[in-house]
Amino acid sequence: MLGQSLLPGFDASPHLTDRLFFAIFPDAGTATQIAGLAQQLREEHGLRGKPLKTERFHVTLHHLGDYAGLPQDLVDVACAAAASIAAAPFDVTFDRAASFSTAPRNRPFVLRGGDGVASLIAFQQTLGDALKKTVLGRWAKPAYTPHVTLLYDDRGVPEQPVPAVSWTASEFVLIHSLIGQTLHVPLARWPLYA
């Protein structure tokens, strides 16, 4: 049975506690490098937002919705879609930083990339194509700007070059995020094979 939040006539609970998304995480060494860069940029720009915890740095591939409780039926659908993909590992490089939003407050300050994220974009589209064959297809958005959120701050920072941060993506992960608790729980992982 589908999660009620996806059925017409059912309103989403006003107290959404659980988020699902697919992501790629950097290896531990690269995550530490990102943490150092986040702190350096924070100081350079006089930002007050606290950098994310090192283990939380990631690239979201597809957000799969917010729910009141973990919708196991949708987790099962997401897992089946992910298992249908065959892809090789690929390199990811982020070489720019900028505030990601024009919102007046709590703007994401992120790493972005140019040509170094082309393979990431292609993989995101492949996963989106698999999702489109399921009830999760509405979450497969064609517009995609890969980024790693470093911190949130009210100040906006224009895009600037930064020392390149690179790693080889060797797996992707389905994450259960407990909203408001800054806790990410991996539900399943899929390795990428050459």
Image: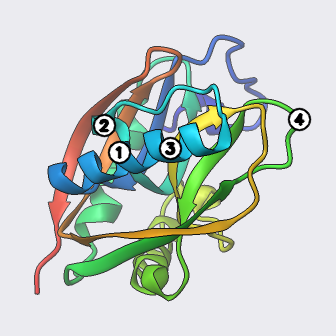
Residue 175 image offset from top left, x and y in percent: 34, 40
From the image, tell me which residue sits under label 3.
150
How far apart marks 1 and 3 lie (CA) works out to 10 Å
Name the N-terminal-most of marks 3 and 4. 4
From the image, tell me which residue sits under label 4.
104
Residues marked 4 and 1 touching at CB (< 8 Å) = no
The mark closer to the camera, 1 or 2, is 1
Q: Which mark is residue 36?
A: 1
- Is residue 18 visible in the rendered image? The answer is yes
Q: How many marks?
A: 4
Q: Of residues 24 and 162, which is closer to you in this image?
A: 162
The mark closer to the camera, 4 or 1, is 1
Crowd tier of the residue under label 1, counting other residues whose Cα lies within 10 Å: few below 14, some 14–19, many 20 or above: some
Q: Of residues 161 and 15, which is closer to you in this image?
A: 161
Residues marked 4 and 2 touching at CB (< 8 Å) = no
From the image, tell me which residue sits under label 2.
54
Secondary structure of the residue carrying tag 3 is strand
How far apart marks 4 and 1 lie (CA) works out to 26 Å
Amino acid carrying mark 4 in the image: Pro
Residue 91 image offset from top left, x and y in percent: 28, 80
